[in-house]
């Protein structure tokens, strides 16, 4: 018997909307609703979609050395954060492999780390292990926190009708405290779809009320419930990496295209020595984006080829609902990582030609940077 799946606070909403429930990170989550993944995907691109992301993990760090601890365990430079600002980062093992990618939020008297659902227990154990010797308190707030994400060009219009907080004053990767539909919480503007939108962190007992209020407010504003399936296709059109597919403990940030968040000059952090050496010597493989030239579906695990030889593996792939072509990501030898390089994807023993392309593949989103 497998471990019993948990239900998020929005489980009843998925049932009400006839969501197709699947196991994901230990939870029963909706992968899609009756309209289908493509319809949900297009709905987010043109209107707005409401996502249940209550399964994500939230750790709160407080104390005089909370920042010092974050600086030790993450690759980005959190000392540059203003109060009410968020940052994309990653945690590494000593050998440089990625434990997880995450968001770091700086509040007025604390920090919050938002980690991937599938890594919550591993991440918490790692943070607690590293916290020894620091004057910092680590609290796991995951089970107390519900997280709803509303994404799409009409998201701001919908949320603004339910809050007195001026959303125009919340910039990209910024956040504020405020009430939405009378429910107090954090209003964040980051996103994982390429569209404008908000993440609403609230107490668990307010989740269903907030979902209902948002759906009611968006009833005539093209708001739809959106599942895991379209979340994946939306992020892939942007070339956003997914932990467990594109990022893992076997690849470093420099190999994974995350050199831009890896601040080797900020001071010591876990994995830095290995990354400095790798930077000096150069990486032998890189995560790249690609587009298929001919019709095909580049699924996870399919071989990437150069000529007839297999040289890599597709880590994520989809037929883009917006663009109508196959797009994906995968690791290839460095000499093939340059944009414009010709590669192939082996699909059912046939090599479909592809071109390495720097993401995003979709560039018309409403996201406000």
Image (cartoon, rainbow, N blue to C red):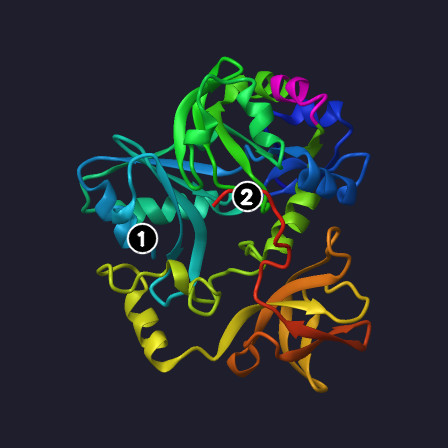
Q: Position of residue 81 (x, y in %)?
A: 30, 44
The stretch in magenta equals 213-221
In front: 79, or 314?
79
Kindly indicate the quadrant of the structure image that contains residue 218. top right
Q: Which quadrant holds residue 156?
A: top right
- Camera-side residue of 42 and 95: 42
Residue 326: image location, x then y, percent: 74, 62
Can the viewer see residue 21 in this picture? yes
Reading the image, the residue beneath label 1 is: 73
Horizontally, is 264 left or right of 153 in the view? left
Q: Which mark is residue 367?
A: 2
**Secondary structure of residue under mark 1:** helix
Whichever of callouts 2 and 1 sits on the residue coming sooner in the sequence is 1
Question: Residue 160 or 307: which is nearer the viewer?
Answer: 160
Residue at x 69%, y 62% (from the top left corner): 327
Q: Taking 165 as reference, is 77 left or right?
A: left
């Amino acid at each position: 018997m497998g471990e019993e799946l948990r239900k998020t606070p929005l489980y009843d909403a998925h049932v009400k909307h006839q969501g197709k429930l699947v196991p994901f990170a230990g939870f029963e989550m909706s992968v899609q609703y009756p309209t289908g993944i493509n319809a949900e995907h297009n709905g987010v691109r043109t209107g707005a979609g409401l996502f249940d992301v209550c399964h994500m993990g939230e750790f709160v760090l407080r104390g005089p050395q909370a920042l010092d601890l974050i600086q030790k365990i993450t690759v980005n430079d959190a000392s540059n954060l203003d109060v009410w600002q968020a940052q994309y980062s990653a945690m590494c093992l000593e050998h440089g492999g990625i434990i997880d990618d995450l968001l770091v939020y700086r509040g007025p008297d604390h920090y919050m780390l938002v980690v991937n659902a599938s890594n919550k227990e591993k991440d918490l154990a790692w943070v607690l292990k590293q916290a020894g010797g620091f004057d910092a308190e680590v609290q796991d707030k995951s089970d107390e926190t519900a997280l709803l994400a509303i994404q799409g060009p009409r998201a701001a219009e919908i949320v603004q009708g339910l809050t007195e907080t001026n959303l125009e004053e919340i910039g990209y990767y910024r956040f504020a405290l405020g009430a939405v539909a009378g429910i107090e919480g954090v209003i964040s503007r980051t996103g994982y779809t390429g569209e404008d939108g908000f993440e609403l962190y609230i107490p668990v007992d307010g989740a269903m009320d907030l979902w209902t209020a948002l759906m009611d407010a968006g009833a005539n504003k093209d708001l739809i419930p959106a599942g895991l399936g379209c979340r994946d296709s939306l992020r892939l059109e942007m070339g956003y990496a997914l932990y467990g597919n594109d990022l893992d403990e076997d690849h470093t940030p420099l190999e994974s295209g995350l050199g831009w968040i890896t601040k080797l000059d900020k001071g010591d952090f876990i994995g830095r020595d290995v990354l400095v050496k790798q930077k000096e010597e150069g990486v032998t493989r890189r995560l790249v984006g690609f587009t298929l030239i001919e019709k095909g579906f580049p699924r996870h695990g399919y071989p990437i080829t150069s000529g007839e030889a297999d040289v890599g593996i597709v880590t994520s792939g989809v037929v883009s609902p917006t663009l109508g072509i196959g797009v994906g990501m995968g690791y290839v030898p460095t000499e093939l990582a340059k944009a414009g390089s010709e590669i192939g994807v082996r699909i059912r023993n046939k090599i479909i030609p592809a071109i390495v392309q720097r993401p995003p593949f979709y560039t018309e989103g409403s996201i406000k940077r």
